Amino acid sequence: MSRLLSNKRLPYLVLGIAFLVTVAYVLTVLPGRSAPSAQTAAPTPSPAVHSDGLSDSHEGYLIKGVKLPEARGKAIPVAFQVFGPDGKPLTEYETVQAKAMHLFLVRDDISGYQHLHPVFAGDTWSTTVDVLDGGSYRFYAEFTPKGWVAAHPIILGMPFVITGDTRLAPLPAPAATSDTGKYVVRRMDGTDHLIAGRGALLRFEVPGAVLEPYLGSIAHMSAFEVRTQGLVHLHPAAGELVFHTQFPYRGEYRLFLEFQVGGEVQRAAFTVLVT
């Protein structure tokens, strides 16, 4: 009989031990208690997310097209508004790189690049643009609201489509030089690949050219990820064609480098592989 009773009590004894072990574990992780280092290690903070023009809204700011191109042509009127988090048209902007608004345009094959500076009247921005072929296009409006404290400006996107026959442009292969028509720009590290998520320097030189200040800087670079068309706008270190870069994704990037010589803006384009 005593053996039978012991067998009956055995499951309760096992449950009791398991309960005590569970209580001891919970006490080690309650607030104010010491816990193993693996349990208390602080998570690595996520990198700050900034806009890239692939959305029409960011942090409560919204862009709306008032008049977008509907057919190909030259000097096509373009107008748009930016709304703030309060839902009202945004009318106060910081002046960044000599302008309150930078407007970029590319087609989805990363061709037809244009860098424009619209004028502001009332609550609406306006300019003109050349669209010489069909296809899917996107405007990128880069601006900094008055009092904005984030490290990056806001970039909002406006897509539009021009119907009809389209001659898509193949992506040029990586090359060590780019001809602007008047100057040959050389990438100092040739066609070396960059590493995704790792900081790097992109160095350029323009033999025979004396670079002048252009929009508050010695040069500007617009970098588009070919797969998504996301935009990163870069500026060089003071007085040199050296850009600090850190591209987050592997793939191909198309870089448009703009600088000024003799009062005339020059543009060079490079394809860079990020592995």
Image: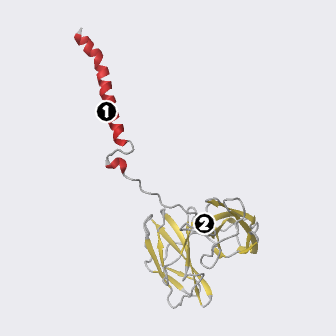
Badge 2 marks a residue whose secondary structure is strand
Residue wearing tag 2: 154
Amino acid on which disc 2 is placed: Ile
Viewer-nearest residue: 128 or 119: 119
- Whole-number angstrom distance, CA of label 1 to CA of label 2: 53 Å
**Residue 165 in the image: x percent, y percent?**
71, 65
Residue wearing tag 1: 21
**Furthest-front residue in view?**
32
Q: Residues within 10 Å of mark 2 (few under 14, many from 20)?
A: many
**Residue 241 in the image: x percent, y percent?**
49, 81
Badge 1 marks a residue whose secondary structure is helix
Compared across the picture, whether 63 is left or right of 260 comes to right
**Residue 56 in the image: x percent, y percent?**
65, 60
Q: Quadrant of residue 22?
A: top left
For the rendered model, the colour scheme is: secondary structure
Rendered position, 130 above or below 198: below
Amino acid on which disc 1 is placed: Val
Residue appearing at x 44%, y 75% in the figure? 201
Residue appearing at x 60%, y 91% in the figure? 262
Residue appearing at x 50%, y 78% in the figure? 236
Q: Quadrant of the C terminus?
A: bottom left
> Can you tell which of label 1 and label 2 is closer to the viewer?
1
**Residue 195 in the image: x percent, y percent?**
43, 66
The answer, for residue 231, to whether it is visible in the render is yes
Rendered position, 40 above or below 58: above
Viewer-nearest residue: 30 or 158: 30
Q: Quadrant of residue 89?
A: bottom right
N-terminal-most mark, 1 or 2: 1
Rendered position, 126 above or below 260: above
Question: Cβ–Cβ below 8 Å for labels 1 and 2?
Answer: no
